[in-house]
């Protein structure tokens, strides 16, 4: 039994598929399957129940793999501690980011990060908030760019910037005639939202004081999986939406039929915005690398967002 074989077993447990697990581990499927079988023989138990349609973890496998995950985490921590002692700015830095932020922020910082810190190898993944926090706890990533606060005592965060919401509406919409737009001017029944699971959808509902998704009008049955899809629907005249300020720099602004304008505070509504944080485990030993990454972000922000002092 070795750490490599435990990693193979965890990959199978997480993907429920030997082929996908092999691809994740960068080995052939016969190699991975052979090592899993050898591990089971060494332990004297069956870790996986295999059928033609599925791969399920056995009850004893769940217990063993729970311990295996802790062993791997400790082994990786030893490697990171040794690396941090040598040079905390050298090596991979695994960063996760939510999909309503990553496409707009990363193009601003990737080249400056490479030029300033060529020894840092950024490994980027784009997933929903719940997935990223789970991966943080599992030590699968080192930090995550999130737009929501976390209540886990295992996490700490670097506060980065406040990102105001802009309103996006079709060119022929009544809002086009208004000099200033506040939240009170929005018709929530025509507000397009991302599908559930995206933190942006919940944030828009919160700032607009919407208790439940609309079940009336053309937007009632629309649950888009990406912000780009929502904006295409806006351009087609299906409704309006709120977009984070960085997204206004996206390619959709060109000949999309969408007008994007900043919201202004209203009589009963403050300026609507979300706060972006770099969240990480308190035990992560390479804090200098995270500080360097945050420094690059803060140095490249446009004036549409507000740096946290």
Image (tube, rainbow, N blue to C red):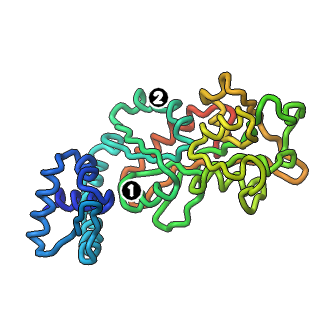
Going by the picture, which residue comes out furthest to the front?
A: 52
Residue 275 in view in this figure: no
Report the residue at 13% width, 51% height from top.
30
Residue 305 left/right relative to 282:
right
Label 2 belongs to which residue? 112
To which quarter of the image does residue 33 belong? bottom left
Q: Residue 54 location in percent, x, y? A: 29, 62
- Residue at image position (44%, 51%) is 143
Percent of width and height locating residue 214:
75, 56
Q: Residue furthest top?
A: 255
Q: Is residue 219 above or below residue 67?
A: above
Element under disc 1: loop
Left-right relation of 165 to 175: left
Q: Viewed as shown, does residue 157 lie left or right of 234? A: left
Q: Quadrant of residue 160?
A: top right
Residue at figure coordinates x 48%, y 49% from the top left = 127
Dot 2 alpha-carbon crowd within 10 angstroms: few under 14, some 14 to 19, many 20 or more: some
The x and y percentages for residue 150 are 55, 61
Total number of numbered labels?
2
* Label ID, residue 233: none
Q: Earlier in the sequence, mark 1 or mark 2?
A: 2
User: For residue 284, which numbered disc appears in the image?
Assistant: 1
Nearest the eye: 264 or 157: 264
**SS of the residue under disc 2:** helix
The reply, left or right, for residue 290 in relation to residue 255 is left
Q: Position of residue 92 (x, y in %)?
A: 33, 42
Location of the N terminus (image quadrant) = bottom left
Q: Which one is nearer the viewer's eye here, 24 or 213?
A: 213
Given contact means CB atoms under 8 Å apart, are the residues at marks 1 and 2 in contact? no
């Amino acid at each position: 039994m070795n750490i490599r074989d435990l990693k193979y077993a965890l990959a199978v447990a997480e993907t429920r598929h030997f082929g996908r697990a092999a691809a994740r581990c960068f080995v052939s499927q016969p190699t991975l399957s052979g090592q899993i079988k050898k591990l089971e023989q060494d332990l004297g138990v069956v870790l996986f129940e295999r059928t033609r349609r599925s791969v399920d973890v056995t009850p004893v496998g769940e217990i063993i793999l729970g311990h295996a995950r802790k062993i791997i985490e400790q082994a990786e921590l030893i490697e990171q501690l040794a690396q941090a002692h040598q040079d905390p700015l050298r090596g991979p830095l695994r960063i996760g980011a939510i999909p309503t932020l990553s496409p707009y922020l990363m193009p601003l910082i990737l080249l400056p990060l490479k030029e300033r810190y060529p020894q840092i190898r950024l490994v980027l993944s784009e997933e929903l908030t719940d997935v990223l926090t789970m991966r943080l706890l599992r030590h699968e990533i080192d930090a995550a760019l999130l737009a929501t606060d976390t209540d886990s005592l295992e996490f700490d965060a670097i506060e980065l910037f406040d990102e105001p919401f802009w309103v996006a509406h079709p060119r022929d919409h009544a809002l086009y005639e208004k000099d200033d737009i506040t939240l009170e001017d929005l018709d929530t029944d025509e507000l397009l939202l991302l599908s559930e699971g995206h933190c942006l959808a919940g944030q828009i509902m919160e700032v607009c004081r919407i208790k439940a998704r609309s079940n009336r009008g053309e937007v009632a049955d629309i649950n888009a999986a990406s912000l780009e899809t929502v904006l295409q629907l806006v351009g087609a005249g299906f409704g309006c939406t709120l977009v984070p300020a960085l997204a206004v720099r996206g390619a959709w602004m060109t000949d999309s039929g969408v007008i994007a304008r900043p919201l202004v505070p209203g009589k009963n509504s403050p300026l609507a915005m979300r706060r972006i944080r770099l969240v990480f485990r308190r035990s992560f030993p390479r804090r200098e690398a995270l500080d360097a990454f945050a420094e690059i972000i803060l140095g490249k922000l446009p004036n549409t967002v507000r740096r946290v002092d």
